[in-house]
Amino acid sequence: MTDISTSPGLLELSWRYLLLGVIQGITEFLPISSTAHLKVVPVALGWPDPGVTVTAVLQLGSIFAVFAYFRRDLNKVLKGILMGLLNGQWNHPDARLGISIFWGTIPILFCGGLIKFFWKGYEDSFFRSTPSIGLVSILMALFLAFAERKGHRHKSLKEVKAVDGLIVGFSQIMALIPGVSRSGVTLSTALLNGWERRDAARFSFLLGIPAITMAGLVEVKDVLQGSSVSELLPLLVGMGSAAFISWLSIRWLLKYLQSHSTWIFVGYRMFFGIALLASWASF
């Protein structure tokens, strides 16, 4: 496990993870990159980089929020898949949504597994550096702006097909690069694919469940093996705050996208990227 500090007390470490959980909850589902903020904010506060392991574990808190918020949707998807298996009713919207999530998850699980088991220096690679995150944030702001301008927004979640899941799923691979934003790249791709804003966001959230869950569970094993009880308690605090804030973020974003565009996130991502590059260049 990568410690966030060399020798903090239990209370101090708990407060730090509480703050990181809040950051995770705000940035995981808004299209602004949780990984980038969990990398940059601790450094700005004078803390060490929490690392891939802590980041992945905090993301489990966000997954709990998704399960809670979309529990009815997930129940419908499971029933749809069951109908497909038992009665061959694969053309039902709920069954097609489940198939889309399945095919859309394969690309990132495959590429994420390759990085986890074969790229041993990933945590210290250039992709996790400040200039890389800044540049990627700017590029993704431009991509989101392009999607906002060119998307036709005529598809709804009931029309989803397996090919839609694959299209958005392949774009999700880019989220392995800090600064890209999983929700940002999948939302942008869905918009370009003709989805309505709110349904594009809903599919982005649902598609993230398998990938984020698997990533978090893989890292939990390492945490349990390499951490004491005093280190696990602050992580639970962080996961709890991440879950609560994530639930609020999901609720807010879906309501916001009913009547607003994504330009506010384009502006923020551009500002965030330029600020990072400027701070890096000044040192």
Image (cartoon, grey):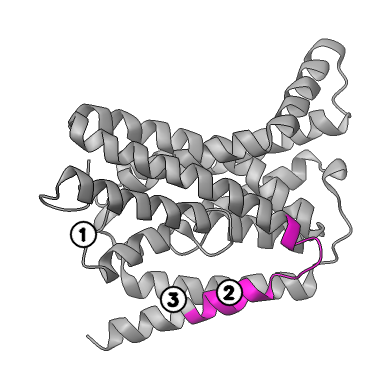
Q: Which structural element holds mark 1?
A: loop
Q: Which residue is mark 2?
A: 141
> Based on the displayed image, in which of its 4 quarters is residue 185 positioned?
bottom right
Q: Amino acid at mark 3?
A: Leu
Label 2 and label 1: CA atoms lie apart by 27 Å
Q: Which residue is mark 1?
A: 48
Q: Main secondary structure of the magenta part?
A: helix
Label 2 and label 3: CA atoms lie apart by 10 Å
What is the quadrant of the N terminus in the image?
top left
State the residue in front, 147 or 119: 147
Residue 282 lies, in percent from the top left, at 26, 89
Q: Residues within 10 Å of mark 2 (few under 14, many from 20)?
A: many
Q: Which residue is mark 3?
A: 135
**Total marks in image:** 3
Q: Is residue 145 left or right of residue 181?
A: right
Q: Looking at the image, is mark 2 or mark 1 earlier in the sequence?
A: 1
Q: Looking at the image, is mark 2 or mark 3 earlier in the sequence?
A: 3
Residue 202 lies, in percent from the top left, at 72, 48
Magenta residue span: 255-271
Q: Looking at the image, is mark 1 or mark 3 earlier in the sequence?
A: 1
Q: Amino acid at mark 1?
A: Pro
State the residue in front, 187 or 173: 187
